[in-house]
Image (cartoon, rainbow, N blue to C red):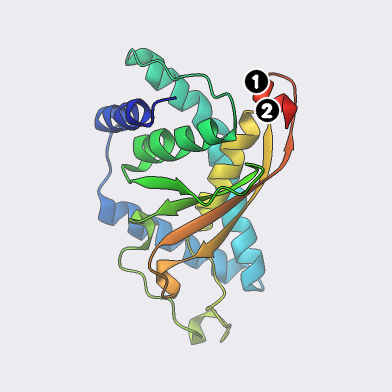
């Protein structure tokens, strides 16, 4: 699969997508996170709820991506293995839906774990995470995974194509890291509909 082709396809699809103001998008998401923090007892529950919301979005993204690609006359190459799939998610999906660059890195030896590196996070503009807040029962907010919705989206997308994964934020710019990094670990590949390379795994 050509990385250039899928990158160009993602960019072309992004230009055709209806756009919302980046500031409005970030503020709306911030309001959602704030409401979830108010509703749940601890930050682990907040992180879990954000991931679940993302999962619900992700399971619908594949159909949207493929239908928009078909309408625009783009052919998405068949993904023969996890590397191909990761490239389509990063270069095609992240670009089409969010307009942001996403890189694939750090594949492990057996090709069943990799990282998605996000340099620009539209969800986190205007955001600063306090260590504690009186408004939220004095709870320690430092362990919040503010953009955990991305992990859920990636999990939902891959589940839609018969790949069960665990996704975890391992680096977060909001916590002082230089990039945002999501670690994706494949737990199970369902053979129904999978390509030959997948089945061999």
The label on residue 111 is none
The label on residue 195 is 1
What element does badge 2 sit on? helix
Residue drawn at point x = 56 percent, y = 87 percent: 138
Q: How many numbered dots are placed on residues in this image?
A: 2
Q: In this view, does 197 lie above or below 130?
A: above
As rendered, which of 137 and 117 lies closer to the eye? Answer: 117
Quarter assignment of residue 91:
top left
Q: Where is residue 4 in the image (x, y as percent from the top left)?
A: 32, 30
Q: Where is residue 42 in the image (x, y as percent from the top left)?
A: 65, 73
- Crowd rating for badge 2 (residues with CA inside 10 Å; few <14, some 14–19, many 20+): some
State the separation of the CA atoms marked 2 and 1.
Answer: 5 Å
Quarter assignment of residue 169:
bottom right
- Crowd rating for badge 1 (residues with CA inside 10 Å; few <14, some 14–19, many 20+): few
Residue 178 visible: yes
Relative placement, left or right, of 85 versus 125 is right
Relative placement, left or right, of 11 versus 79 is left
Q: Name the residue under label 2.
A: 198
Q: Where is residue 19 in the image (x, y as percent from the top left)?
A: 27, 39
The residue positioned farthest toward the front in the image shown: 109
Residue drawn at point x = 67 percent, y = 34 percent: 163
Q: In this view, does 104 lie above or below 30?
A: above
Picture quarter with the C terminus: top right
Asked if the residue at tag 1 contacts the one at tag 2, i.e. Cβ–Cβ closer than 8 Å, the answer is: yes
As rendered, which of 7 and 126 lies closer to the eye? Answer: 7
Residue drawn at point x = 40 percent, y = 63 percent: 179
Picture quarter with the N terminus: top left
Q: In this view, does 190 lie above or below 50?
A: above
């Amino acid at each position: 699969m050509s990385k250039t082709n899928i990158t160009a396809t993602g960019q072309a699809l992004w230009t055709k997508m209806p756009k919302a103001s980046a500031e409005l998008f970030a503020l709306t998401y911030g309001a959602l996170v704030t409401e979830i923090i108010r509703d749940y007892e601890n930050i682990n529950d907040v992180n879990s709820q954000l991931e679940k919301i993302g999962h619900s979005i992700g399971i619908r993204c594949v159909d949207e991506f493929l239908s928009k690609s078909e309408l625009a006359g783009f052919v998405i190459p068949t993904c023969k293995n996890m590397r191909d799939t990761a490239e389509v998610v990063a270069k095609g999906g992240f670009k089409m839906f969010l307009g942001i660059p996403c890189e694939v890195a750090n594949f492990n030896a057996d090709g069943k774990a990799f990282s998605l590196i996000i340099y620009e996070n539209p969800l986190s503009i205007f955001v600063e995470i306090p260590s504690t807040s009186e408004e939220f029962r004095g709870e320690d907010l430092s362990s919040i995974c503010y953009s955990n919705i991305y992990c859920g989206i990636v999990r939902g997308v891959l589940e839609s194509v018969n790949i069960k994964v665990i996704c975890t934020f391992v680096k977060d710019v909001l916590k002082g890291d230089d990039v945002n990094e999501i670690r994706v670990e494949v737990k199970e590949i369902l053979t129904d509909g999978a390509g030959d390379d997948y089945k061999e795994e």
